[in-house]
Amino acid sequence: MLHAPPAPPFPDSLRGTTVLHLAVAASRGAAGARPLLDAVRAAAVPAVDTWGASDAARLAQIHLDPPSATPALGDARWLTAGTPGRAGDILSTAVADDSPVVMLEIRGVGSDAAARPGAQTTGAGPFIVHGVAPLRAPEARPGIAHAFDELRRIVEPVDAGYSVGSWVEGATSVPDALPVPIRRQVAATADAVDPTGIIHRYRFLT
């Protein structure tokens, strides 16, 4: 769910409106994505349909992120397999014109690939919810915090119990990003290979 700004790259008909944006990446190409795309196109005629073959540079643009750094706060949670049944309620939290959350996505990240050895090589769930709110002034923080609190209340039935640490923008720490045993294992590894702390530690390791 995206509050499109009144500027390119959005077409005139979508500028300044609230848009349901579907981003699909299929490593097997058009044939692998066709069943999903056909189902989506049958449900509603897209206002803009740009799906097609892409190189690596264009792949990085499918989420329509701003081209330059923008002051913002963000929240992100791992979600369980029951997420599709709650998707409408979750996305509706960002529909209002005056919502401080300008982008709210549910991203499917499930995979049948075998997990590799390591401290954390799989996600905590097959879905992620990620919200972003621009921080135009310090006094906007309370309203944004309230919106994120409401989002967490709505996702609670399908919350897997962990934040997506690297997607939580503007927080001083993210203590629930990793289970405690894994956090300790990663921190111990960091201490072993970088005892003097030359490399900056991620805030969710401590």
Image (spheres, rainbow, N blue to C red):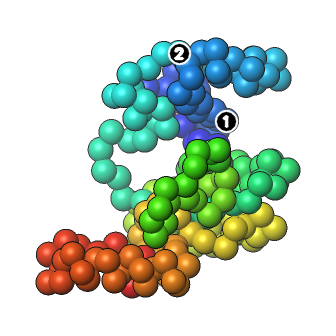
Q: Quadrant of residue 16?
A: top right
Residue positioned 53% across, 15% down in the render = 52
Q: In the rendered image, is residue 75 in sight? A: no
Q: Is residue 129 above or below residue 110?
A: below
Q: CA distance from mark 1 to mark 2?
A: 18 Å
Q: Residue 127: give its label.
A: none
Q: Position of residue 94 (x, y in %)?
A: 67, 52
Residue positioned 80% across, 48% down in the render = 84
Q: Quadrant of residue 125?
A: bottom right
Q: Are marks 1 and 2 in contact (CB under 8 Å)?
A: no
Residue positioned 28% across, 77% down in the render = 190
Q: Is residue 168 left or right of residue 32?
A: left
Query: Tag 2: Cα neighbours inside 10 Å, few (<14), some, or many (≥20)?
Result: few
- Disc 1 marks a residue whose amino acid type is Leu
Is the N terminus in the top left, top right, bottom left or bottom right quadrant?
top right
Count the labels in the image.
2
Q: Which residue is nearer to you in this view: 143 or 110? A: 110
Q: Is residue 156 left or right of residue 205?
A: right
Is the C terminus in the top left, top right, bottom left or bottom right quadrant?
bottom left
Q: Dot 2: what SS?
A: loop
Q: Position of residue 148 (x, y in %)?
A: 62, 68
Q: Position of residue 138 (x, y in %)?
A: 41, 72
Q: Position of residue 178 (x, y in %)?
A: 52, 75
- Dot 1 or dot 2: first in sequence order is 1
From the image, tell me which residue sits under label 1.
Answer: 20
Q: In the rendered image, is residue 103 in sight? A: yes
Q: Which residue is nearer to you in this view: 93 or 31? A: 31
- Disc 2 marks a residue whose amino acid type is Gly
Q: Is residue 144 above or below residue 26?
A: below
Residue positioned 60% across, 71% down in the render = 162
From the image, tell me which residue sits under label 2.
Answer: 52
